[in-house]
Image (spheres, helix red, strand yellow):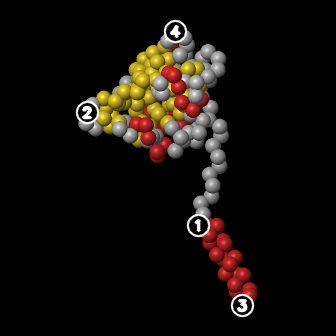
């Protein structure tokens, strides 16, 4: 009887182990692009897709980001989207480079300027993929919790988009989480 119980326990343990999915290997640390020509990056970008997030819940589509260089080396940021009722929602902020000139690592703040001394009001903004023509980009942060695909135009050619998705998947992103942004 004791053997039977031990055998049953071993069978239960093996069955449980088989049912528990193997843990995926942790993704390598996220690397941004090698360098960013900030002047070329300025202007309007259309959001093509994103990981859903709490601060864009009200957005129904036509989402853009407008970047303008400042004389102090920072960047003015205006994120705009259309809500379901047809009105526009704007978020105005500022980005600052993290490190040397040409760094693709920035921090962005949408909190009031008087709170800028508080570290947690700044969020990472890393350009992790960018085509040579500065027309298609992917932006994220070290934990890969957020992801945005941006384009200079409201639509992206399918081949270029699929190639970007493959590169993002190779960087450890779950591309099935991406939500397309309507750009009508």
Q: Earlier in the sequence, mark 2 or mark 1?
A: 1
The residue labelled by disc 1 is 19
> Which quarter shows the N terminus?
bottom right
Dot 3 alpha-carbon crowd within 10 angstroms: few under 14, some 14 to 19, many 20 or more? few
Q: What distance separates the C-alpha of mark 2 from that of mark 1? A: 48 Å
Q: Identify the secondary structure beneath mark 4.
A: loop
| Horizontal and vertical percent position of residue 51 | 46, 40
- Considering only vertical position in the picture, is 22 above or below 46? below
Q: Earlier in the sequence, mark 2 or mark 4?
A: 4
Callout 1 touching callout 3 (CB < 8 Å):
no
Q: Earlier in the sequence, mark 3 or mark 2?
A: 3
Is residue 114 left or right of 90 when viewed as pictured? right
Q: Farthest residue to the top: give it.
A: 71
The residue labelled by disc 3 is 1
Closer to the camera: disc 3 or disc 2? 2
Dot 2 alpha-carbon crowd within 10 angstroms: few under 14, some 14 to 19, many 20 or more? few
Q: Farthest residue to the front: give it.
A: 114
Q: Identify the secondary structure beneath mark 3.
A: loop
Closer to the camera: disc 4 or disc 3? 4
Q: Identify the secondary structure beneath mark 2.
A: loop
| Horizontal and vertical percent position of residue 157 | 39, 30
The residue labelled by disc 2 is 86
Q: Earlier in the sequence, mark 4 or mark 3?
A: 3
Q: Quadrant of residue 123?
A: top right
Q: Earlier in the sequence, mark 1 or mark 3?
A: 3
> Which quarter shows the C terminus?
top left
> Measuring 40% from the left and 33% from the top, which residue is drawn there?
48
Foreground of the two, 127 or 66: 66
Is residue 176 left or right of 99 when viewed as pictured? left
Q: Quadrant of residue 100?
A: top right
Q: Earlier in the sequence, mark 4 or mark 1?
A: 1
The residue labelled by disc 4 is 71
């Amino acid at each position: 009887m004791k053997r039977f119980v031990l055998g049953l326990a071993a069978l239960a343990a093996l069955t449980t182990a088989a049912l528990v999915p193997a843990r995926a290997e942790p993704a390598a640390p996220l690397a941004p692009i090698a360098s960013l020509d900030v002047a070329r990056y300025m202007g309007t970008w259309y959001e093509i897709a994103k990981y859903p997030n709490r601060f864009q819940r009200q957005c129904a589509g036509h989402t853009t980001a407008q970047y303008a260089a400042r004389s102090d080396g920072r960047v003015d940021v205006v994120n705009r989207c259309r809500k379901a009722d047809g009105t526009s929602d704007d978020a105005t902020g500022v980005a600052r480079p993290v490190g040397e000139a040409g760094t693709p690592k920035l921090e962005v703040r949408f909190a009031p300027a008087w709170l800028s001394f508080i570290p947690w009001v700044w969020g990472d903004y890393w350009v992790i993929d960018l085509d040579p023509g500065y027309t298609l980009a992917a932006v994220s942060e070290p934990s890969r919790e957020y992801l945005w695909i941006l384009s200079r135009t409201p639509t992206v050619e399918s081949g270029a988009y699929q190639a970007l998705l493959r590169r993002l998947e190779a960087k450890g992103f779950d591309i099935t989480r991406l939500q397309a942004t309507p750009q009508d």
